[in-house]
Image (cartoon, grey):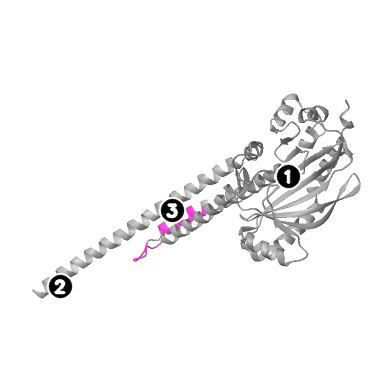
């Protein structure tokens, strides 16, 4: 049967862009600030379908509505809604959602690809920056040590909730070609490339489906449940935060070596090691990063929901979140080793100073004894 005969009764195209804006965000304070503003609708975001004991946010993010948004599709203006989510480890996610209703599969494909292309344009850049600045301004008093980072993560979510005819997941894949939505490329792929792209396909019931790629996902979900989209957003937020700290460590480690070299050739104080201040700075730096990484690692707790757990773990692997986390851990270990070496050096210096003081006291006692005699 012709694939174009399938029509989407209810669905959407969502575009995510995530930013790191602070060391951390006090979500209780942010929520209180937003509740005082009658023009802003805000609430704590929780997973809608899964049982709390099966999967849950460690600290539920605050979601706030940012109002209507417009984007060009097929030469016409398509209207959607913008909202933001605020995570306690300093990341905000701007989400643009455009409804896809009463359109065919090919039209949905074109809509997704054109919106993705628009999202990377100069016009869209101004829109993203405006929405980011608006969100930041609304919650600014809740930001702890605001930061500026050029790092961003983006992701495209195509969700289908209802077709013009009920289809099981296997039949759905037989009737449509998901590749153009997952790649943005209308050219046919080789059998090997198709198989590799469809490797991250997951389903639990006979009528639900999630196909993941590096920067896009296709979700077939016959209920209004958005848990799959939510965990994909969390995985992107974790990737962004880990990338931010990976870059910070890349910049910090050479500076540490330079500071150690300068301290080594400098004049040694008679009362303290030249490495004492540096060791204290390193300890504080490592403690702060470790605290944030704990929040990132525990952002989502998955225990009993097998389907969501598989999707989430696949996203962590596909986005290379665990690889990035291992890189950060390795660099933190280098700094910890440096701190320990500096601490040992400082302890040795204190021991040497104490030994010298004892020798001086003994010498003084001998001299005083001789002088008395």
Query: Farthest bottom residue?
Result: 372
Residue that mark 2 sits on: 368
Residue 140's image quarter? bottom right
Residue 26 in picture, x, y percent from top left = 62, 61
Q: Nearer the viewer, mark 1 or mark 2?
A: 1
- Count of labels in the image: 3
* Mark 1 vs mark 2, CA separation in Å: 85 Å
Dot 1: element: loop
Q: Nearer the viewer, mark 1 or mark 3?
A: 1
Q: Which residues are magenta?
A: 254-272
Q: Is residue 259 left or right of residue 356?
A: right
Query: Farthest left residue?
Result: 373
Taking the spot 66% from the left edge, 51% from the top edge, the residue there is: 151
Q: Is residue 255 left or right of residue 228?
A: left
Residue that mark 3 sits on: 339
* Mark 1 vs mark 3, CA separation in Å: 45 Å
Q: Earlier in the sequence, mark 1 or mark 3?
A: 1
How packed mark 3 is, by other alpha carbons closer than 10 Å (few <14, some 14-19, many 20 or more), is many
**CB-based contact (under 8 Å), mark 1 and mark 2:** no
Dot 2: element: helix
Is 257 or 202 nearer to us in this picture? 202
Residue 260 in picture, x, y percent from top left = 44, 55
Residue 154, relative to residue 195: is it above or below?
below
Q: Earlier in the sequence, mark 3 or mark 2?
A: 3
């Amino acid at each position: 049967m012709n694939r174009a005969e399938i029509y989407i009764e209810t669905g959407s195209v969502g575009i995510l862009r995530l930013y790191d804006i602070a060391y951390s965000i006090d979500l209780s304070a942010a929520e209180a600030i937003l509740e005082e503003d009658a023009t802003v609708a805000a609430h704590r975001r929780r997973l809608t379908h899964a049982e709390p004991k099966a999967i849950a946010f460690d600290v539920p993010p605050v979601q706030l509505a940012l109002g209507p948004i417009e984007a060009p599709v097929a030469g016409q203006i398509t209207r959607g809604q913008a909202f933001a989510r605020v995570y306690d480890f300093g990341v905000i996610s701007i989400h643009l959602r455009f409804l896809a209703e009463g359109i065919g599969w090919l039209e949905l494909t074109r809509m997704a690809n054109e919106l993705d292309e628009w999202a990377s344009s100069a016009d869209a850049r101004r829109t993203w920056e405006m929405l980011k600045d608006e969100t930041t301004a609304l919650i600014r008093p809740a930001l702890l040590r605001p930061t500026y980072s050029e790092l961003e993560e983006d992701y495209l979510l195509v969700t289908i909730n209802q077709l013009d005819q009920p289809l099981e997941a296997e039949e759905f894949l037989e009737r449509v070609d998901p590749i153009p939505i997952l790649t943005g490329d209308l050219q046919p792929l080789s059998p090997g490339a198709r198989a590799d792209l469809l490797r991250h396909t997951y389903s639990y019931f006979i009528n639900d489906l999630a196909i993941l790629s590096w920067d896009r996902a296709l979700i077939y979900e016959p209920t209004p449940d958005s848990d799959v989209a939510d965990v994909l957003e969390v995985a992107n937020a974790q990737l962004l935060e880990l990338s931010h700290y990976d870059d910070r460590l890349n910049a910090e480690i050479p500076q540490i070596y330079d500071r150690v070299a300068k301290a080594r050739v400098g004049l040694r104080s008679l009362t303290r090691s030249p490495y004492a201040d540096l060791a204290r700075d390193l300890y504080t730096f490592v403690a702060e990063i470790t605290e944030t990484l704990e929040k990132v690692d525990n952002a989502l707790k998955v225990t009993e929901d097998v389907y969501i757990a598989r999707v989430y773990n696949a996203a962590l692997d596909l986005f290379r979140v665990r690889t990035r986390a291992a890189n950060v851990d390795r660099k933190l270990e280098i700094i910890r080793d440096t701190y320990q070496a500096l601490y040992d050096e400082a302890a040795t210096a204190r021991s040497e100073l104490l030994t010298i003081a004892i020798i001086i006291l003994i010498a003084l006692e001998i001299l005083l004894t001789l002088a008395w005699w």
